[in-house]
Amino acid sequence: MDAAVIVEVGPRDGLQNEPGFVATADKLALIGRLAASGLSRIEATAFVAPKWVPQMADHDAVMRGVPRRAGLVYSALVPNVQGAAAAIAAGADELAIFTAASESFCRRNINCTIAESLERFRPVMALAAEHGLPVRGYVSCVTDCPYEGAVAPAAVTRVALALRDLGCTEIALGETLGRAEPGRVAALVADVAASLPPERLAGHFHDTGGQALASIDVCLAHGIRVFDAAAAGLGGCPYAPGAKGNVATGRVARHLAARGFRTGIDAERLAEAEAFAAALRGAG
Ligand code: HMG
Ligand code: MG
């Protein structure tokens, strides 16, 4: 049986969009349940500016409080070296930097151009290397931008290669709006996969239009085996109005199992974690 990996992004991508502040203890309780389900990678929080994303303001306490288990990697989303230094000090095992294939989204999300974002990441990469940490790079808006519309695959490949050149171990293709038809995802993945091996890629699909599992199938056909998901489909992006959460973790786990992939996840425990996540929605 082949292995596939689910990266749980609910505590970050899911909760970042919750309108009311979710208590740190609840975030940690969610992460604890997710950890107990056998997931091997969890994006625990984001070391971003609290005035931009207030929900992640407790990043330090969350990263310091996560339950550790051998083989379980906790990553932190970081926009700059300030965030990277804080994430490393708090015990992050992996960093995730993020930019976009669309200038307008990049500007709204991290207040700089794509080129400036890549320059900003250089000291992040140097710091991560000093500490021996892997860095994932996200490209947002891989098919569509909320402000510019359709995005050309070649623009995504250019940014993905720039992140690879910076030293990212994995490039996550972010379908931020979650509305792309699988045919458009296929064109995008084919373009990127012509330049980067599938082992370096991950699929990050929001599920606004209910097409995320079909997009995952497109990725599987190209040999991609790493997929992001959020417990109970929590979330969205504060800078992509109307976009829904990532595809739900349980749905992805069942989908991968049905296609013969081993994920190491205990379905019952994951269901408990997802019930807890669903109860947090709107409860803050
Ligand atoms: P800025 O305002 O241009 O930056 O924001 P600045 O350098 O002028 O700093 C402004 C203030 O923020 C200063 O504080 C800094 O100290 C502070 P003040 O002097 O005003 O008190 N600051 C920080 N505080 C904590 N941690 C930091 C940090 N950096 C600066 N790391 C910045 C630029 C990038 C910081 C800001 O735009 C930001 O934090 N953006 C984050 C946006 C975000 O988190 N978006 C959601 C995540 S991305 C996403 O969801 C997409 C993804 O899921 C993939 C997909 O679906 O496509 C990944
Ligand atoms: Mg996202």
Image (spheres, helix red, strand yellow):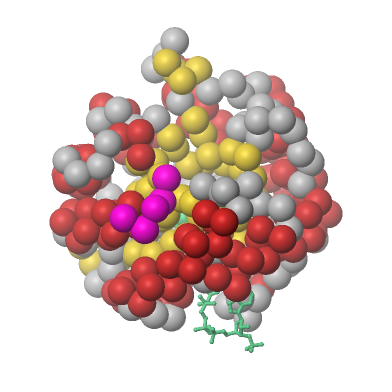
Query: Please, is residue 7 above or below residue 235 in the view?
Result: above
Q: Position of residue 77 (x, y in %)?
A: 56, 59
Which stretch did the figure color magenta? Answer: 165-169
Residue 202 lies, with reference to residue 257, above or below; the image says below
Residue at image position (49%, 68%) is: 123
The mark tally for this picture is: 0
Q: Is residue 29 magenta?
A: no
On screen, residue 1 above or below 158: above
155 vs 91, left or right, is left
Query: 168 or 183, which lies in front?
Result: 168
Q: Quadrant of the N terminus?
A: top left
- Residue 41 location, quadrant: top right
Quadrant (top left/top right/bottom left/bottom right) for the C terminus: bottom right
**View extreme (front): residue:** 130
| Residue sitting farthest toward the right | 25
Percent of width and height locating residue 145: 30, 65
Q: Main secondary structure of the magenta part?
A: loop
Residue 195: tell me if it is visible: yes
Viewer-nearest residue: 273 or 279: 273
Q: Residue at x 49, y 62 (%)?
A: 126
76 to 134, vertically: above or below: below
Residue visible at 65% across and 21% down in the picture: 266
- On the image, the x and y values in percent for residue 225 come to 39, 30
User: 151 or 245, which is in the foreground?
Assistant: 151
Please identify the quarter of the rendering in which residue 83 is found. Answer: bottom right
Locate ligand 1 by image quadrant.
bottom right
Q: Is residue 7 left or right of residue 23?
A: left
Q: Position of residue 40 (x, y in %)?
A: 61, 32
Residue found farthest to the top: 1
- On the question of residue 75 being in view, the answer is no
Residue positioned 66% across, 58% down in the render: 88
